[in-house]
């Protein structure tokens, strides 16, 4: 079977569909929930949010962010907890 070839215009239209954006938001919300649980167990009071939008070339995205600046990777004084990294890796 020959692979389907999409034009750039078709690809941009597909990746910006509401159903694609809905799925991205769904997955990001699952990751955000696991991140909140990981932060809570690490004793952090960080806020977790989901940002979504469309990139300049038309591709949709959903991004999970938190405001714990040092806990993800740690410092000399702050232990590393990798709340977001572990949330992405676990399903």
Image (cartoon, rainbow, N blue to C red):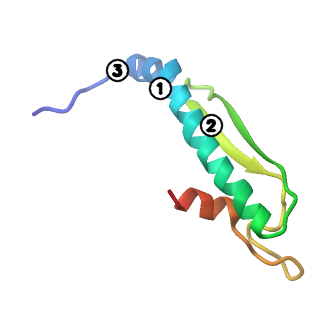
25 w.r.t. 71: above or below: above
Quarter the N terminus occupies: top left
Occupied quadrant, residue 58: top right
Left or right for 4, reference 39: left
* Residue 71 visible within the image: yes
Q: Secondary structure at mark 1?
A: helix
Residue 82 at x, y = what percent? 69, 68
76 w.r.t. 58: above or below: below
Q: Secondary structure at mark 3?
A: loop
Q: Nearer the viewer, mark 3 or mark 2?
A: 2
Q: Residue furthest bottom?
A: 76
What residue is rendered at 71% in x and 59% in y?
37
What residue is rendered at 83% in x and 67% in y?
70
Q: Residue furthest left?
A: 1
Q: Earlier in the sequence, mark 3 or mark 2?
A: 3
Q: Nearer the viewer, mark 3 or mark 1?
A: 1
59 w.r.t. 28: above or below: above
Within 10 angstroms of label 2, few (less than 14), some, or many (20 or more) residues? Answer: some
Q: Secondary structure at mark 2?
A: strand
For mark 1, what is the residue? 15
For the residues marked 3 and 2, what is the alpha-carbon distance in whole angstroms? Answer: 24 Å
* Mark 2 in CB contact with mark 1 (< 8 angstroms): no
Left or right for 53, reference 22: right
Occupied quadrant, residue 74: bottom right
For the residues marked 2 and 1, what is the alpha-carbon distance in whole angstroms? Answer: 12 Å
Residue 17 at x, y = what percent? 49, 19
Q: Earlier in the sequence, mark 2 or mark 1?
A: 1
What residue is rendered at 56% in x and 25% in y?
57
Q: Nearer the viewer, mark 2 or mark 1?
A: 2
For mark 2, what is the residue? 62
For mark 3, what is the residue? 7
User: Viewer-proximal residue, 61 or 82?
Assistant: 82
């Amino acid at each position: 079977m020959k692979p389907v070839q999409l034009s750039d215009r078709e690809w941009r239209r597909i990746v910006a569909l509401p159903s694609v954006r809905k799925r991205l938001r769904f997955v990001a919300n699952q990751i955000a929930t696991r991140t909140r649980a990981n932060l809570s167990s690490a004793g952090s009071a960080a806020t977790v949010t989901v940002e979504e939008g469309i990139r300049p070339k038309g591709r949709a995205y959903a991004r999970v962010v938190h405001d714990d600046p040092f806990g993800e990777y740690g410092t000399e004084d702050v232990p590393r907890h990798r709340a977001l990294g572990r949330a992405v890796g676990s399903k």
